[in-house]
Image: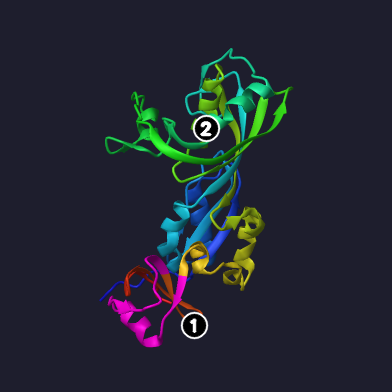
Amino acid sequence: MARKRKGDKVDGWLVVDKPADFSSAKIVAIAKRIFNAQKVGHGGTLDPLATGILPVGFGEATKTMPYIVDATKEYQFTVKWGTATDSDDCEGEITQSGGHVPSVADVEAVLDEFVGTIEQVPPIYSAIKVDGKRAYALARAGVDVEIKPRSVEIQSLKHVSFNADTGESEFHVVCGKGTYVRSLGRDIALKLGTYGHITVLRRTRVGPFSLDAAISLEKLEDMRHSARAAGDLQPITTALDDILALAVTAQEAADIKMGRSIQNPKAKQGVCLLVNGDIPVAIAEAEGENIRPLRVFNM
């Protein structure tokens, strides 16, 4: 007999505006406790320093998590010019100082070189695995960490403002999965012949989730006193807005849930969302008229 999960069956997405000094795991733990949910996860880690959008998926929504992790993201970030740190942000130890503060014209002149597919070395204080261990764990243990460059996609990078009093510039970036904004700030500074590190990092969009739909930690905590907390969740299919939806019959839905393939002449090549009425049935893949289930929803 399968062991029964503890907690309630809760399905859907909650978008939290994560405050600074909280880990993503801590926010997930709070959400799980408040909703008494059986299963909870988040769509992309935010550093404790960072604020902004943290999509929290409950129950069946966790089956759509890869689509959120791989989604386009937007950030506002601030670079402090003239000093570098070992973590590439203001929480690390200073490793270089005395660099110059570049002019706005010089900053804006190099930004196009960071748009498109670029090579980027993640910070040593990151979750990248090196020889099977997390880079940050090795760095904290005093081990010299060598991380290989990786290709990332920068769709847009703009200089927003410059503060002459603090020697800081604010930027806005739209980027693909795996991009480290801390590395981006560091590399812009190096391109300008100086040093730099991130002092402010805020994620403003993750795929379909924006700040307009986000709730504060305070509101999340207040939900523990609300009988309608689950009513604040977005549908599990919110993460699949860019995927073609295909209607199936009740019999076809039953076949899919049993792991069987179905035939549909309206199918288009690639991944699709199968729905029966308003009920999501599965994420599936179409090859010609043949449709096979990839992830089945238990709704």
Identify residue for label 1: 277
Magenta part of the chain? 245-272
Q: Is residue 28 above or below residue 184?
A: below
Q: Is residue 38 above or below residue 50?
A: below
Identify residue for label 2: 114
Residue that appears at 44% across and 75% down? 246
Q: Residue 158, how many percent across, how many down?
A: 63, 36
Decide which of tag 2 and tag 1 comes sooner along the chain.
Answer: 2
Which of the two residues, 151 or 238, is positioned nearer the viewer here? Answer: 151
Is mark 2 in CB contact (under 8 Å) with mark 1? no
Mark linked to residue 104: none
**Residue 167 makes an appearance in the image:** no
Which of the two residues, 282 or 17, is positioned nearer the viewer here? Answer: 282
Q: Is residue 63 above or below residue 197?
A: below
Q: From the viewer's perspective, tell me whether residue 45 is left or right of residue 162.
A: left
Query: Which label lies toward us, 2 or 1?
Result: 2
- Whole-number angstrom distance, CA of label 2 to CA of label 1: 45 Å
Q: Residue 218, how many percent across, how many down?
A: 65, 55
User: Secondary structure beneath disc 2?
Assistant: helix
Q: Residue furthest right?
A: 165
Q: Is residue 196 magenta?
A: no
Which of the two residues, 44 or 223, is positioned nearer the viewer here? Answer: 44
User: Secondary structure beneath disc 1?
Assistant: loop
